[in-house]
Image (cartoon, rainbow, N blue to C red):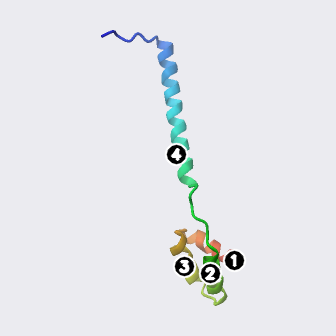
Amino acid sequence: MLPLDIAAPSLVALTAVVTAGAIWLIILAVRLTKSPRNRPGVSVDLVDQVRELKALGQIQEAVFFVRGETGMSQRAAARFVNRL
């Protein structure tokens, strides 16, 4: 078996390229997890039901309903209900 004779400058360059590629893949993975592209939208039926609950003065129930249907956080669901 022949030994690999890699010169020091080319080994450093190869290490730099591999490291940059790994960092790029990590950044890409983090960005994709923060904004999933297949997130379902809010349905018209949900909006109508939330508006009805809000008109009846049942704000907390509306927030709870939005959270159950969409998986939103408490803060996001409350913001959604308040904007309707």
Q: Give amino acid for label 3.
A: Phe
Q: Is 1 situated above or below 33?
A: above
Q: Position of residue 27 (x, y in %)?
A: 55, 42
Dot 4 lies on which element? helix
What is the spatial separation of the Cα atoms under label 4 and label 1, in whole angstroms? 34 Å
Circles 1 and 2: CB distance less than 8 Å? yes
Circles 3 and 2: CB distance less than 8 Å? yes
**Residue picked out by circle 4:** 29
N-terminal of the pair, mark 3 or mark 2, is: 2
Q: Give amino acid for label 1.
A: Leu
Left or right side of 57 for 64? left
Q: In the rendered image, which quarter contains the N terminus?
A: top left
Circles 3 and 4: CB distance less than 8 Å? no
**Residue picked out by circle 3:** 65
What is the spatial separation of the Cα atoms under label 3 and label 2, in whole angstroms? 8 Å
Dot 3 lies on which element? helix
**Residue picked out by circle 2:** 50
**Residue picked out by circle 1:** 84
Left or right side of 43 for 6? left
* Residue drawn at x 53%, y 52% as measured from the top left: 33
